[in-house]
Amino acid sequence: MNLIFFDMEGPLSVQDNAYELMKLFPDGGKVFEVISRYDDLLALEGREGYEPGDTLALIVPFLVCHSLSLRDIEGLADRAFIVDGARELINSLKDWHVFCISTSYEQYASRIVRRVGIAQENVACTRFDVKRYQSLAKEGDLAIVRDIEREILTIKLGDDESMKKRLDHFFWVELPRTSLGLALEEVKPMGGRRKAGALQRFVQAYGGSLERTVAVGDSITDASMLEAVNNAGGLAIAFNANEYCLPYATIGLASTNIGDLRTALDAWEQGGRETVETIIREKEKGGGKGDRENFHWLEGRSDLKEPLEIHKRTRRIVRQEAGKLG
């Protein structure tokens, strides 16, 4: 039984859901870039109880403050660009069980997976009751959010120390005292170890094993999921990945069309990981075809500089503005 799990943003859709939502209000994109970097720092320091992707909890006060609605979220999903080859690849996996595990809000993820052809019951994503938090918000607390928003706009990306000190105080001291603090407790984004846990639950429910599982991801939120699959002897694929994801994968593919992944999946069906290694190493020797078919065998590789440069370049092409996020 072949099971394959896709992250959504990156492998299937181009834009970053949270980034695009924040960009719906003035300077929201700049605010998000700072919070996204803050999310990376919290994840890398191993803050207790914090997972990569918890950005989607951190931005709730700002979304509420600017009255973003369910319609806004659904509208973004309907307009989002799908990665070239995604629909065709998923449609071709007739003998596979196909899943999506996404950090995105459920209202966004459900519409994207429908567009690419993944069944709703095979999706794990972030629950977000936007109306609940809007109804709880008090005007005085919204003023506090507007104040920190103005402060964030003065922070320069790269000044990690000052940014982290200020946002630590806001998110973990000031915000919990407000009506919006509940969002940090209740919104649990599907990232990091939560993604790995969701994958394992699906595998168990279908009577499969991690050893016969394929996972596809591209960012820090996918690292735990890819690591779990790779360590079990499955196939963990980094697609147009960043430096936080690449070290945890079995193979890498940098391409403007995810349909190129079919080469590795056919090899997996033919002879498992051993056959994949043989074919991918041959592909790697031959080199890619421009921005297509740039394969790398990553398991056991210590120097990732060359593949990382190729992934970064292709990531910027495919993911546009979202390519710079962690």
Image (tube, rainbow, N blue to C red):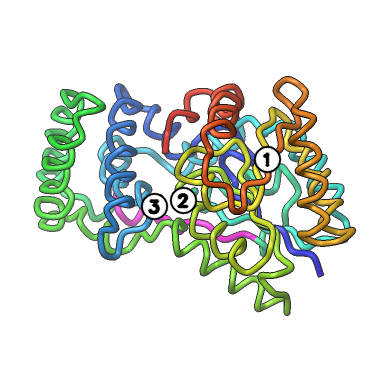
Give the x, y percent position of residue 308.
54, 33
Give left or right: position of 39 versus 138. Answer: right
Residue at 74% across / 58% down in the picture?
A: 98
For residue 124: magenta? yes
Q: Are marks 3 and 2 in contact (CB under 8 Å)?
A: yes
Residue designated by label 3: 52
Looking at the rendering, the stretch of residues picked out in magenta corresponds to 123-134
User: Alpha carbon of mark 2 to alpha carbon of mark 1: how far?
Assistant: 21 Å
User: Alpha carbon of mark 3 to alpha carbon of mark 2: how far?
Assistant: 5 Å
Give the x, y percent position of residue 135.
28, 53
Please identify the quadrant where the C terminus is shown.
Answer: top left
Please identify the quadrant where the N terminus is shown.
Answer: bottom right
Compared to 188, does 260 lie above or below? above
Secondary structure, mark 3, is loop
At label 2, which amino acid type do we have? Answer: Thr
At label 3, which amino acid type do we have? Answer: Pro
The dot on residue 30 is none
Residue designated by label 2: 221
